Image (tube, rainbow, N blue to C red):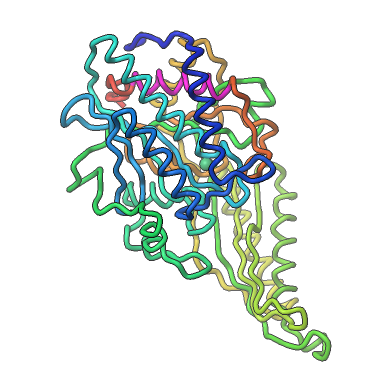
């Protein structure tokens, strides 16, 4: 039974969402239709200011915590816990305009629609609502990804996040201060003024399951396992012309073999294993020097923990062979890993109920990418929703989702949020 009157199809609400999305997408816009707003850059700052203005204009209280997570608090019931709705506004370099930003904007619109609906009905819900923009979900400028939500859920100490540096040596603390986004204290949790009752996030799928099957809504019930590593391939600097081939300890040769080994591994397992090398830093990177060191970022993902462990072991064995063949040393530094995990079944059931009641087509999906909800789901009742990505394209300027899907996603998010503030996940 719905606990809240279902929103009528509202063409004006759709228009407002699309107009705001166009305005938001103009910040940090790239020529081919994407955006570049890496975490705590001036473009990220401009996006955050845009959101802050939008929220403040509609009566939300805007505040940032001490790692730059940005909240728009809507107090409906004094002293009651908050249901959070949001995603992230930061992007990859030359990223897509939908990844994360749609989820934050949809959350803001959902909260505003909910507020208006409750006021019109003269109804007081059980919980308050907060829109959230998690800091540094992408992990492109500062590693690792999902940083703000990791600190929020106690997975990373705030000092670790604040002391993290980008390639230029700028810390998160300094970068956040420079854009005026560093808060002074926690907003939620022990010792903070507010508590959390639940979390809901909507995001583009970044895969092709929904697009391929013509389905509007993905009910995210599980996340893939992932192993992400920073490794160094260590050789010896030498002259590219004069040094005998037999004497060379070419770090880039070793790194090249490692990149090929990674891809071969994925080919061996089919689509059950995704592998990648996303960044390669060559030292000293001079045209006439055999590289002494290559720093690499490796990424292995699978729906199966066992398969991922097997692939990881196979990769280590291959690395041992590469060390001999290229006469290099391969060192593993930072690791960011997570196992495959279920999303809370009660949250999946709630989203299914809402989709049915709204007459929106839906299917269960797994997420291959990490999301802030990956962290939140272990801490509070959580719902994760996907809308289609055309051709599954993401982290690229050609990322695209149709207007109709953006609007239906907002309807589902609004109704899900409406049921959560009435306590629909309290039994979970
Ligand atoms: Zn994202």
Q: Can you give x and y, in whole percent of width and height, for residue 85 in the image? A: 38, 32
Q: Is residue 5 magenta?
A: no
- Along the line of sight, which residue is nearer the eye, 58 or 163? 58
Q: Quadrant of the C terminus?
A: top left
Write down the region rendered in magenta: 405-419
Q: Can you give x and y, in whole percent of width and height, for residue 357 in the image? A: 46, 10
Question: Residue at position x 36%, y 47% from top?
Answer: 69
Question: Residue at position x 49%, y 64% from top?
Answer: 166
Question: How many marks can you see?
Answer: 0
- Along the line of sight, which residue is nearer the eye, 269 or 92? 92
**Direction from residue 428 to residue 81 in the image, left or right:** left
Q: Can you give x and y, in whole percent of width and height, for residue 71 in the image? A: 33, 40
Q: Can you give x and y, in whole percent of width and height, for residue 329 in the image? A: 63, 78
Question: Residue at position x 70%, y 50% from top?
Answer: 266
Q: Quadrant of the N terminus?
A: top left
Main SS, magenta region, reads helix
**Direction from residue 313 to residue 185 in the image, left or right:** left
Quadrant of res 312: bottom right
- Along the line of sight, which residue is nearer the eye, 89 or 231? 89
Quadrant of res 327: bottom right
Q: Is residue 409 magenta?
A: yes
Would you place residue 77 above or below residue 271 in this image?
Answer: above
Question: Residue at position x 29%, y 10% from top?
Answer: 120
């Amino acid at each position: 039974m719905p606990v809240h009157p279902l929103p009528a199809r509202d063409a004006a609400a759709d228009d407002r969402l699309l107009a705001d999305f166009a305005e938001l997408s103009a910040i940090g816009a790239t020529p081919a239709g994407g955006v570049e707003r890496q975490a705590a850059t001036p473009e990220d700052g401009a996006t955050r200011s845009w959101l802050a203005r939008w929220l403040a204009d509609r009566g939300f209280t805007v505040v940032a915590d001490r790692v730059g997570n940005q909240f728009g608090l809507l107090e409906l019931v004094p002293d009651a816990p908050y249901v959070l709705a949001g995603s992230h506004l930061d992007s990859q370099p030359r990223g897509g305009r939908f990844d994360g930003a749609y989820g934050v904007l949809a959350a803001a619109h959902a909260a505003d629609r909910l507020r208006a609906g409750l006021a019109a009905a003269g109804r007081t819900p059980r919980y308050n609502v907060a829109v959230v923009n998690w800091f540094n979900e992408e992990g492109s400028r500062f590693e690792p990804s999902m940083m703000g939500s990791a600190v929020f859920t106690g997975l990373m100490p705030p000092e670790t996040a604040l002391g993290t540096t980008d390639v230029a040596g700028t810390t998160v603390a300094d970068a956040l201060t420079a854009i005026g986004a560093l808060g002074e204290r926690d907003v939620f949790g022990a010792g903070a003024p507010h508590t959390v009752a639940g979390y809901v996030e909507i995001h583009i799928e970044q895969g092709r399951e929904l697009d391929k099957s013509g389905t509007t809504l993905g009910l995210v019930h599980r996340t893939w396992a992932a192993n992400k590593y920073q490794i160094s391939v260590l050789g010896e600097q030498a002259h590219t012309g004069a040094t005998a081939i037999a004497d060379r300890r070419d770090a880039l040769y070793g790194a090249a073999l490692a990149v090929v080994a990674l891809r071969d591994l994925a080919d061996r397992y089919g689509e059950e294993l995704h592998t990648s090398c996303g960044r390669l830093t060559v030292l000293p990177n001079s045209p006439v020097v055999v590289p002494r060191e290559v720093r690499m970022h490796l990424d292995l993902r699978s729906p199966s923990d066992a398969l991922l462990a097997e692939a990881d072991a196979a990769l280590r064995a291959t690395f041992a062979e590469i060390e001999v063949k290229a006469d290099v040393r391969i060192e593993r530094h930072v690791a960011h890993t997570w196992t495959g995990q279920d999303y809370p079944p009660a949250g999946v059931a709630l989203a299914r109920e809402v989709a049915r009641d709204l007459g929106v087509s839906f299917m269960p999906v797994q997420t291959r990418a990490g999301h802030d909800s990956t962290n939140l789901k272990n801490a509070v009742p959580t719902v994760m929703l996907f809308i289609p990505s055309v051709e599954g394209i993401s982290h690229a300027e050609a990322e695209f989702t149709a207007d109709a899907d953006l609007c239906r996603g907002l309807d589902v998010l609004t109704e899900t949020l409406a049921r959560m503030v009435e306590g629909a996940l309290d039994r979970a």
